Amino acid sequence: MSETIMIVAGETSGELYGALLAAALKKRMPRIRIIGVGGERMQQAGVEIISWIAGAFGLAEAISSVWTIKKTFNKAVMALKIYKPDVLVLIDYPDFNLKLALQARKNHVKVLYYVSPQVWAWRKKRTAKIAGLVDKMAVVLPFEEEIYKTVGIPCEFVGHPVHDEIKDLLSKKDVLKSELGLDKGRPLLSLLPGSRPHELQRLLPLMLAVVREFKKEYAQYQFCIPFAPNTDMEKYRPILRLLREEGVAINKGESLRTLAASEVAVIASGTATLQAALLGVPLVVVYRLFPLTYWIGKLIVKVKHVSLINILSGGAVVKELLQSEATTQNIVAELGKILSIESYKKTMTDSYAKIRDMYSAKNASERVADIVEEMAGWKK
């Protein structure tokens, strides 16, 4: 029996989840063949990469990547036909992956959707479309399970793969600083500007300005920016030179360990905010989009908060500074509030406990590996 699965991740965070899943499957079945769309981490986990990730986010950003995305899609469809995987695992990236799910249906390939599209935030009618394309959902936010069960899709809350990663990092702050080449005797402000090109273009100059201003009041701090493994560092050489001149340490592929070593963080809204909450790191959330993209988003996205911490908590646990509010002065002021008012910081970090409780008994990668085996008929 040829045991083959295909994993498709369109962006950096999803690529990490794909790598963790691949590693879990390879540990159980060393001879399993895993093909997919992903990046360096999936490749290192034993995935045969048929095309590299080509993620884009937002109207203006997607237009610039349309030909690359189309080429990746065609390669993925061809792989379905040639390799005929027992299960296709789709990770987030809905506009691409739901089209691919249709092709899987045509080729009689079972589909597991891992990490749901944000149907609770916008385009809720997509659940009916998903029901016709997907055999099972494995969701990472607890309230998503009921949404899909309501429309008749088999669905399970499996936990979150970021929680799988942090278990060995808690209470290792000083050790991690040394391993990352940082001074273990100095507090650390980490700055995570996201992984998408448009995020880096808009947020790296802001992060530079924050460092320059923050140093005036908090000279004892050191700084680090961890980049995603798939980042083209050459593209950002001018701004990286300026950051290094300000004493900012730069690394690649070490975002989780950098966060775990931090006393406080500035984070682009995304998965890293959840990582920070699970690690107990106080933070401020920032985000800037192309103005037209943001304006359209405001019209169609129906959520009060953008960060996973606030969404899961049901309230404003952490400060969100978006668009025109994401200024140097506002960010430094919020950092100062966290560092100077102990009760403010404690209220924030105490609120993280509710989120940790949601995930403490779960192991997403192992459970999804179970589901893949069950769907493929390998589990006895």
Image (cartoon, helix red, strand yellow):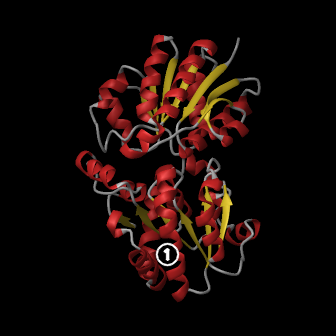
Residue sitting at 38 percent across and 45 percent down?
A: 60
| 218 is higher (above) or lower (below) than 369 | below
Residue sitting at 59 percent across and 87 percent down?
A: 219
Q: Position of residue 15 (x, y in %)?
A: 58, 41
Residue sitting at 37 percent across and 40 percent down?
A: 144
Helix, strand or loop for disc 1: helix
| 368 is higher (above) or lower (below) than 12 | above
Q: Position of residue 127 (x, y in %)?
A: 32, 30
Which quadrant, please, contains the C terminus? top right
Q: Position of residue 365 (x, y in %)?
A: 60, 39
| 111 is higher (above) or lower (below) than 362 | above
Which quadrant, please, contains the N terminus? top right
> For the residue marked with disc 1, what is the amino acid?
Val
Asked if residue 198 can be seen in this view, the reply is yes
Q: Position of residue 248 (x, y in %)?
A: 63, 72
93, 211: nearer the viewer: 211
114, 37: nearer the viewer: 37
Quadrant of the rendered structure where residue 17 is? top right
Outermost left residue = 299
155, 210: nearer the viewer: 210
Residue sitting at 45 percent across and 31 percent down?
A: 96
362, 307: nearer the viewer: 307
State left or right for residue 309 relative to residue 236: left
Quadrant of the rendered structure where residue 121 is? top left
Asked if residue 282 can be seen in this view, the reply is no
Question: Badge 1 is on which residue?
Answer: 210
Quadrant of the rendered structure where residue 259 is? bottom right
Crowding near pointer 1: few (<14 within 10 Å), some, many (20+)? some
